[in-house]
Image (cartoon, grey):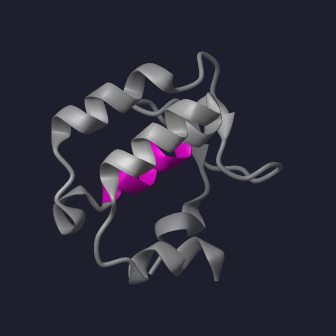
Amino acid sequence: NVFHAHEAVKRVRLRQLLDYIKELDSPTLAAKAGVILDRYKDRWHIPESELTGLQQYVPRNPARFERGVKGRLNKRWNIIVPPKLFAE
């Protein structure tokens, strides 16, 4: 399942990832990455300052993590996250 593939990640090349997100200039991508990085920040040793910096790239209006799927608004990242994303 694509939604759970991120659980296999052991470490993240954070600087490369953040630079790529900024280069693509996609607020929805920034929000999606933010949700996942925020969720696994302890496991992947993501500094809070990097997450705070990424927040400036999120969409102004709420985006959806997955088109046509209902979920809950993650206010920090301004994105509607489906319940199955982090379901066990």
Q: Position of residue 66 (x, y in %)?
A: 72, 53
Query: Is 64 included in the stretch rendered in magenta?
Result: no
Instruction: Read off the magenta span.
Output: 32-39
Tell me: 7 left or right of 52. right
Nearer to me, 86 or 15: 15
- Determine the residue positioned at 61% across, 56% down: 82
Residue 28 to residue 86: above or below: above
The number of numbered discs placed on residues in the rendered structure image is 0
Residue 33 to residue 82: above or below: above
- Determine the residue positioned at 83% across, 50% down: 68
Q: Is residue 19 visible in this depiction of the protein? A: yes
Nearer to me, 52 or 39: 52
Q: Position of residue 16 (x, y in %)?
A: 40, 49
For the N terminus, the quadrant is bottom right
Residue 60 to residue 30: above or below: above
Quarter of the rendering containing residue 88: bottom left
- Determine the residue positioned at 42% across, 56% down: 36
Quarter of the rendering containing residue 7: bottom left
Tell me: 63 left or right of 76. right
Q: Position of residue 55 (x, y in %)?
A: 39, 27
Main SS class of the magenta portion in the image? helix
Nearer to me, 65 or 51: 51
- Determine the residue positioned at 65% across, 48% down: 65
Q: Position of residue 9 (x, y in %)?
A: 38, 77
Q: Residue furthest right?
A: 68
